[in-house]
């Protein structure tokens, strides 16, 4: 009787840790086509039906660590200016990724602003309504030193 009791406790302790430890850590490095690390890449865990559960960002040398539950089976990698990748996790513990450059060039930007029509409290005649249209050629914008489209258009309007 005592032997049965100890044997059942030993078996319980042997099989219990795998049942509790469902999460695992996946690590890796994200680089570009030339092999240079890319800092700031979004790494997000998603399920097969595209539900996002957990996420992180790569550090200065392109490395990341993320906890993954077994029911989630994809890692999504995305960064501005690079093509996003979706990689199946399976039983991997280390996933290194190479992102390819995806360049899109903007020819020109047109910004239109229009005053809202009357809301019932204030009637403004058609002649008194303010509208504005400004077309900018991207050759004139200072895009070399800009980090975003807003920075490139600053002072142009």
Image (tube, grey):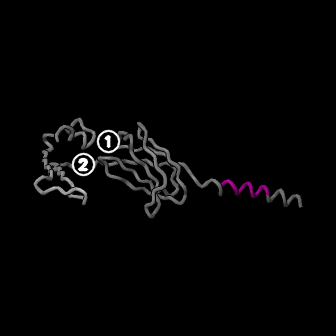
Q: Which residue lies furthest to the left in this view?
A: 127
- Find out whether residue 156 is within the magenta segment: no
Q: What stretch is highlighted in magenta?
A: 9-18
Q: Are marks 1 and 2 in contact (CB under 8 Å)?
A: no
Could you say which quadrant of the image residue 142 lies in?
top left
Name the residue rendered at 20%, 48% in the picture. Answer: 105
Secondary structure at badge 1 equals loop
Give the main secondary structure, helix, strand or loop, of the magenta stretch. Answer: helix
Q: Which residue lies furthest to the bottom in this view?
A: 49
Q: Residue 107 location, x and y as percent?
A: 15, 49
Label 2 crowd bin: few (<14), some (14–19), many (20+), radius 10 Å: few
Q: Considering only order in the chain, which callout, 2 or 1, is on the residue closer to the N terminus?
A: 1
Location of the C terminus (image quadrant):
top left
Residue at label 2?
103
Q: Residue 134 location, x and y as percent?
A: 13, 47
In the image: residue 18, left or right of residue 58:
right
Secondary structure at badge 2 equals loop
Seen in the picture, residue 86 relative to 34 is either above or below; the reply is: below
**Nearer to the camera, 150 or 14:** 150
Name the residue rendered at 46%, 49% in the picture. Answer: 55
Q: Residue 123 location, x and y as percent?
A: 19, 57
Residue at label 1?
34
Q: How many marks?
A: 2
């Amino acid at each position: 009787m005592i032997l049965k009791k100890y044997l059942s406790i030993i078996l319980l302790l042997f099989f219990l840790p795998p049942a509790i430890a469902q999460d695992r850590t996946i690590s890796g490095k994200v680089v570009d086509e030339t092999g240079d690390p890319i800092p700031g890449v979004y790494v997000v865990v998603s399920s097969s039906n595209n539900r996002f559960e957990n996420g992180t960002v790569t550090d200065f040398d392109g490395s990341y660590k993320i906890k993954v539950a077994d029911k989630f089976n994809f890692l999504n990698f995305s960064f501005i200016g690079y093509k996003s990748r979706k990689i199946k996790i399976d039983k991997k513990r280390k996933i290194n990724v190479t992102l390819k450059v995806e360049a899109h060039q903007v020819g020109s930007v047109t910004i239109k602003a229009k005053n809202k029509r009357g809301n019932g409290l204030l009637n403004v005649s058609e002649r008194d309504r303010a509208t504005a249209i400004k077309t900018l050629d991207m050759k004139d914008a200072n895009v070399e030193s800009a980090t975003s489209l807003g920075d490139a258009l600053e002072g142009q309007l």
